[in-house]
Image (spheres, helix red, strand yellow):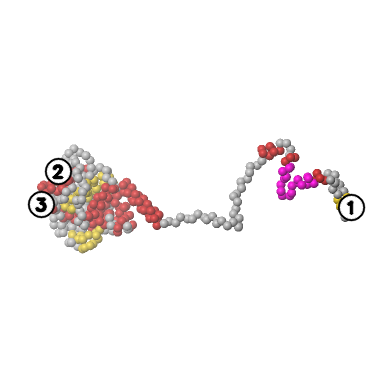
Amino acid sequence: MVMTYRGDDGGRRMPPPRPAGRSRDHQRAQMMPLPGRGQSPYDERTRPMGTREDERQYAPPPTRQDPPRRAAGDDYPPSRPPRRRRWGFGRILLTLALVFVVFLAGIWVYLEFSIKRVDALADYSGRPVAASGTNWLVVGSDSREGLTTEDEERLATGDVAAAGGGQRTDTIMVAHLPDNSTKPTLLSLPRDSQVAIPGHGKNKINAAFSLGGPKLLAQTVEGATGLHIDHYAEIGFGGFAKIVDAIGGVDMCIDKDMNDTVTGISIKAGCPQTLDGRSALGFVRMRHSDATPRSDLDRVANQRKFIGALVSQIASPGTLLNPFHFFPLLGSGPDALTMDSGDHVHNLVGLAIAMRGISSGGVVTTTVPVTNGSAENWDKTKSKQLFDALKNDTEIPDSVIVN
């Protein structure tokens, strides 16, 4: 079929001939890339040989692209910033508890390595075997270590040469802590008691300390009482006064005026009244006074009374929670106290807890039964009953308690 072209004149005309080469040029124009559209895929046909391999070999690595940003019109909620954790009551309480534990641990370590030690307890042939309960030998010595001449005059410690020289003990006690429900016992041994001192014959018990120190004293006490001594604690004149002053004094009830004709210390009657270091030292040493007619027997009774008040006041919240008392006590305690090389702070804490009941009647306080007021000779029958009760952790008969 031959197609015709009808012109304006209505005649039949043949379509105008195409210019030569127009069809191929038009095709080429269709294959040319538009601006901004990149190359046409057909251009690949005209690449020279080897071009693709070279581009693959030298093409730069692809650039790292950031994740797409959220468009302004997106309707999903924006991400929230991380919330800060609030410290609840439980966490605060736990933190305070940990700080308190670390604080106690620090004090424990400080005391453990600061307290002076001495080899006071040693095994020897014929030593009493350990029985029920635990026994402490508590010694108050007349040591003036660390005291200046002014301190000795202020405390009225007396002259060492006038006292016979050497180091002696003004206080000798055995603290018995039972293993059962019976009450603890604080037993005083009068310092003038005549006992056998190993290697030195018979003499006053306090002479053992002067002759052989803590080790000979402990052995002498074990031989005289038949009690096995498990722990040792000693405090001197200066350390005793510093501890009392560190806690602001000790409250006591004094029934009668006390005027020591030897030391010159005077304490007025009053209840309650606060004894500072000087007055407290005079109180526990006083025996030459109208208020102490039984001499050493009255003195040891006053010593037990004061120890009860001292321990109770140290353990009170008014001391432990008061930094003006607690830290001076912490600083003076290690210098004042001497323990056996095998003792530790937890042993001392156990003793302090047991002795808190002295003031309230929770501790039996007594002196070794003696035959007369000079307190030189022990009553053998009553003394044996007393020591047997301590060995077996049984109640002490009232008939052998001396106060």
User: CA–CA distance between discs 1 and 3?
Assistant: 171 Å
User: CA–CA distance between discs 2 and 1?
Assistant: 165 Å
Q: Which residue is drawn at 22% across and 50% down?
A: 140
**Along the polypeptide, which appears first: circle 3 or circle 2?**
2
Going by the picture, which residue comes out furthest to the bottom? 270
**Mark 3 = which residue?**
372
Residue 305 locus on image (x, y percent): 20, 56
**Mark 1 = which residue?**
11
Residue 136: in magenta span: no
Q: Which residue is drawn at 73% across and 42% down?
A: 42
Q: How many labels does the image show?
A: 3
Visible in this render: residue 232? yes
Viewer-proximal residue among 233 and 275? 233
Viewer-proximal residue among 24 and 236? 24
Kind of element beneath mark 2:
strand
Residue 101 locus on image (x, y percent): 35, 51
**Along the polypeptide, which appears first: circle 1 or circle 3?**
1
Q: Nearer the viewer, mark 1 or mark 3?
A: 1
Magenta residues span: 26-43
**Mark 2 = which residue?**
196
Residue 49 locus on image (x, y percent): 73, 36
Tag 3–tag 2 contact (CB < 8 Å): no
Q: Which residue is drawn at 19% across and 41% down?
A: 129
Going by the picture, which residue comes out furthest to the top? 50
Tag 2–tag 1 contact (CB < 8 Å): no
Seen in the image, is 84 located left or right of residue 143?
right
User: CA–CA distance between discs 3 and 2?
Assistant: 19 Å
Going by the picture, which residue comes out furthest to the front? 1
**Along the polypeptide, which appears first: circle 2 or circle 1?**
1
Work out which quarter of the rendered image holds the N terminus and state it: top right
Q: As shown in the figure, which amino acid type bears the numbered disc 1?
A: Gly
Q: As shown in the figure, which amino acid type bears the numbered disc 2?
A: Ala
